[in-house]
Amino acid sequence: MKWQEVRELFPDQFVLVSIINYHEEDNKKIVDEVAPIRIISKQDANKEVLQVKPGNMVYHTSNQDFVIHLRRDPLMRVRRNTNEN
């Protein structure tokens, strides 16, 4: 099902979906097709986001497009030992 169809069926709600198809542009994953699993209440949204299984995602239908911003090669801070004996 296209994201626009999900938006029409479940307006202004959090929805748990399984991501079926996507493509990447720059540092973004653009989701093209999803399978809705269930509606998530506002109260449970944060908890569900933390417990979501790989391949699934909680997303709000107020978003025009389903876009996931990817972090590639995040900067890593390394603490160096400055105590030289």
Image: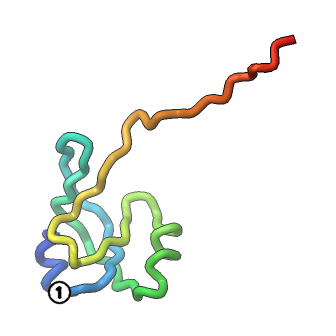
The part of the image, by quadrant, that contains residue 35 is: bottom left
**Which residue corresponds to the image point at 33% horizontal and 47% vertical from the top-left?**
70
Q: Position of residue 31 (x, y in %)?
A: 21, 58
**Which residue corresponds to the image point at 34% horizontal and 85% vertical from the top-left?**
39
The part of the image, by quadrant, that contains residue 64 is: bottom left
Q: Position of residue 14 (x, y in %)?
A: 33, 80
SS for callout 1: helix
**Which residue corresponds to the image point at 41% horizontal and 33% vertical from the top-left?**
73
Mark 1: amino acid: Leu
Query: Could you say which is closer to the camera, residue 43 or residue 23?
Result: 43
Query: Could you say which is closer to the camera, residue 56 or residue 24?
Result: 24
Q: Position of residue 13 (x, y in %)?
A: 29, 85
The part of the image, by quadrant, that contains residue 79 is: top right
Residue receiving disc 1: 9
On-image quarter of the C terminus: top right
Vertical relation: 54 (above or below) 84: below
Q: Is residue 13 left or right of residue 30?
A: right
Vertical relation: 48 (above or below) 11: above
Q: How is the image coloured?
A: rainbow
Vertical relation: 1 (above or below) 79: below
On-image quarter of the N terminus: bottom left
Q: Is residue 77 left or right of residue 14?
A: right
- Could you tell me how many numbered marks the image carries? 1
- Residue reaching furthest top? 85
**Which residue corresponds to the image point at 32% horizontal and 67% vertical from the top-left?**
18
Vertical relation: 75 (above or below) 65: above
